[in-house]
Amino acid sequence: MAFLEVKNVRIAGLSAGVPKDVVKNEGDAVQSADYDAAAFVETTGVTQRRVSNTLTASDLAFFAADKLLLDLQWDKSEVEALIFVTQFPDYHLPATSCVLQDRLGLSKDCYTLDISLGCSGWVYGLSNAATLMQSGCFKKVLLLTGDGRRFADICLDPLFGHAVCATALEYLEGADSIQFHFGTDGSGFDAIIIPDGCARKQITTDSFNEEVIDAKVYNKLMIRMNGIDVFSFAISTAPKSVKKLADHFGFDYQDADYYVFHQANMKINKMIQKKLKLDDEKVPYSLHDFGNTSSASIPITIVTQLKNQLKDKSTKFICCGFGVGLSWGAVRFTTDEHLVISELVEVNNDQIDTVHVV
C-alpha cells in the first residue's frame, strides 16, 4: 500500500496567483446543447473563472512565489529546492522549474524538478518536497502547482480556470508529521486526456479538426473528459482514500478542523462530503470564484477561503486530490500559529516572461 509519513517539516506559507481577468459563466460563455448557463452554474457551482490567453503557468507561479517569499521575509538564496507541478510547461524541454529558478533569482545551488500531474498534483508535490527535507539536508523549499495558458484555448470551457499556488516548506525538528496515501489507475488514462501534441500522437492538420462529443465541440489539442467515468471514479475513490489514510495511521478522520478537496465540480464534491458525513462549515469551496484549477485547487481554497480563520492558531487539515491519470492522493497535516498566507495576487495579461523566450 502506498503510504508515507514525513516528520520535521512544516508548511510555512501559502500564496496564489491568478489572472486579473474574470470571465463570468453567463449567456454565451456556456456553450452546450445540454444546458444553459444557469443550469451549468447550478450543477457545477462555477459562477466565474480567472483566465488568460497570454499568461503561462510559469508567469502565475513567478508572481505567487515572489509575493510569498516577500511576505515570509525569506532570502532567495536560502531556497534550496523548487518543485513545479503543471500539465502545461513553457516548453517540452527544458524543465520549466529551471526557468523559474533563474526568473525568481534563486541560487544556482538549487534543486529543481518538474512534475506532470493535474488534480492530485498538490498532494504529490507536497510529498516530494517534504521527503527531500525530512533529514534536514534541505531547509527551505518552494512547491509551485497549477496551470495557466494551455496548448489550445481553454477560455471556452466554463469549468476550468487558471491559477498557480506557491507553498513554502521549512525544516523544523519536532514539527507534526505529514501523512499521505496515494493511488493510481492507469487503465483510466483516457478518462481525462488531450489526445494530440506529444510523442505518441504528434500534431498534424487533423489535430485542429473539430468534432462534437457529448454535445460539445472539441479538437484533439483540447482536454476531453468522460464525465460519467470521472464522476464514478471521484465519488468512490476520494472517500476511500481518506478512510484508508485514517485507518493506516490510526486516527479518526472526523477530528480535522477542515477538509479541502480538489475542486472538481460541486456535484462531485458534495457527494464526497456526504459520503464522509462532513459538516458544511468544515468543507470550504473556491469553485464559485475560480472554477476547477487543477493542482492549484486545494491551496487556492485555503488561501482564499480560510486566510482569516487560520490566524494565530494551530489547525488540522485533511486534503484529497483526484483526477487525470487516473491519480489520487490524500494528506493529513497541521498548520501552526506562524503560518503566512499572502493576499491573492492578480496578474495582468502583459506581465509575461520576456526573457526566457526564443
Image (spheres, helix red, strand yellow):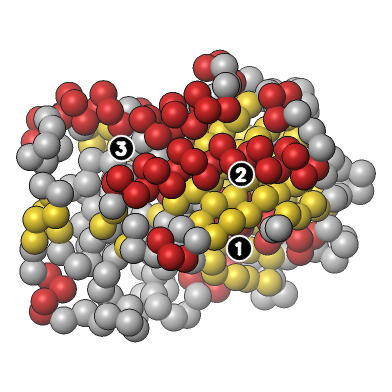
Left or right, 155 with reference to 325: left
> Between marks 3 and 2, how big is the CA–CA gap?
29 Å
Quadrant into which the N terminus falls? bottom right
Identify the mark at residue 46; answer none if there is no mark: none
Q: Amino acid at mark 3?
A: Arg
Left or right, 15 with reference to 119: right
Residue 330 location, quadrant: top right
Specify which label sits upstream in the sequence, 3 or 1.
Answer: 3
What residue is shown at x 50% (from left), y 24% (from top)? Answer: 274
> Between marks 1 and 2, how big is the CA–CA gap?
24 Å
SS at badge 1 = strand
Return the x and y of residue 242 as percentages of the image width and height: 63, 39
* Numbered disc in front, either 3 or 2: 2
Q: Amino acid at mark 2?
A: Ser
SS at badge 3 = strand
The residue beneath circle 1 is: 83
Using a 10 Å C-alpha cutoff, classify the residue at mark 2 as few (fewer than 14 neighbours), some (14 to 19) or many (20 or more): many
Quadrant into which the C terminus falls? bottom left
The residue beneath circle 3 is: 49
Using a 10 Å C-alpha cutoff, classify the residue at mark 1 as few (fewer than 14 neighbours), some (14 to 19) or many (20 or more): many
Q: Amino acid at mark 1?
A: Ile
Using a 10 Å C-alpha cutoff, classify the residue at mark 3 as few (fewer than 14 neighbours), some (14 to 19) or many (20 or more): many
Return the x and y of residue 269 as percentages of the image width and height: 44, 32
